[in-house]
Image (cartoon, helix red, strand yellow):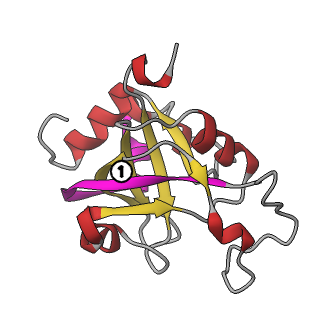
Amino acid sequence: MTRARRERRFWLMKSEPESFSFDDLWKAPRRRTFWDGVRNYRARNLLRDELAEGDGVLFYHSNAKPPGVVGLAEVASVARVDPTQFDPRDDHFDPGADPESPRWYGVEVRALRRLPRFVSLEEIRSQKALSKMALVQRGQRLSVQPVTPSEWREIARLGGAPEP
């Protein structure tokens, strides 16, 4: 099945609000930004091979007090090479990255709406309907994670968003 023909998928993408918050995305031109700096191979593979334009995104503030979902977004482009891997002045520089065979990729993300109500990790953990969500599984630290359609709807509901 080609990317253009498959069903819409859903993802949770983590960002530390001190580095890049949902408000930063909301204020970006056209409410879009390139999601760069991912330096985990499993997360890279998801970005490169699985995320597709139009997929839904739960924007999650990690390493925050408290952590949780703050907004809804969507994937706005297919994956492309992350240029920060080649820039020695960038925090995401990778001296082993080769422009002839790039190591790291990213996608563009577009903000759709702020959640009227913040959905904390503690609240997510307390919901039986979300007990199998990757986010709450032991050892799950990926910055990009798959989310089922029902998990997406439940978090949107908890956050007070209209039916996505």
Q: Residue at x 58, y 54 (%)?
A: 143
Left or right: where 155 falls relative to 46: left
Q: Quadrant of the C terminus?
A: top left
- Mark 1 closeness class: few <14, some 14–19, many ≥20 residues within 10 Å: few
Magenta segment, prevailing SS (helix, strand or loop): strand
- Residue in front for this viewpoint, 110 or 15: 110
- Residue lying furthest front in this view? 100
Residue 151, how many percent across, how many down? 37, 32
The residues colored magenta run 105-127
Left or right: where 6 falls relative to 103: left
Image quadrant assignment for residue 91: bottom right
Q: Which amino acid does label 1 sit on?
A: Glu
Q: How many marks?
A: 1
Task: Indicate whether residue 43 is drawn in magenta.
Answer: no
The residue beneath circle 1 is 123
Residue 99, how many percent across, how many down? 78, 60
Left or right: where 2 falls relative to 122: right
- Residue lying furthest top in this view? 1
| Residue 61 visible in the current orientation | no
Residue 149, how many percent across, how many down? 36, 27
Q: Which residue is drawn at 45% across and 40% down?
A: 11
| Residue 103 visible in the current orientation | yes
- Residue lying furthest bottom in this view? 89
Residue 100, how many percent across, how many down? 81, 54
- Residue in front for this viewpoint, 121 or 80: 80
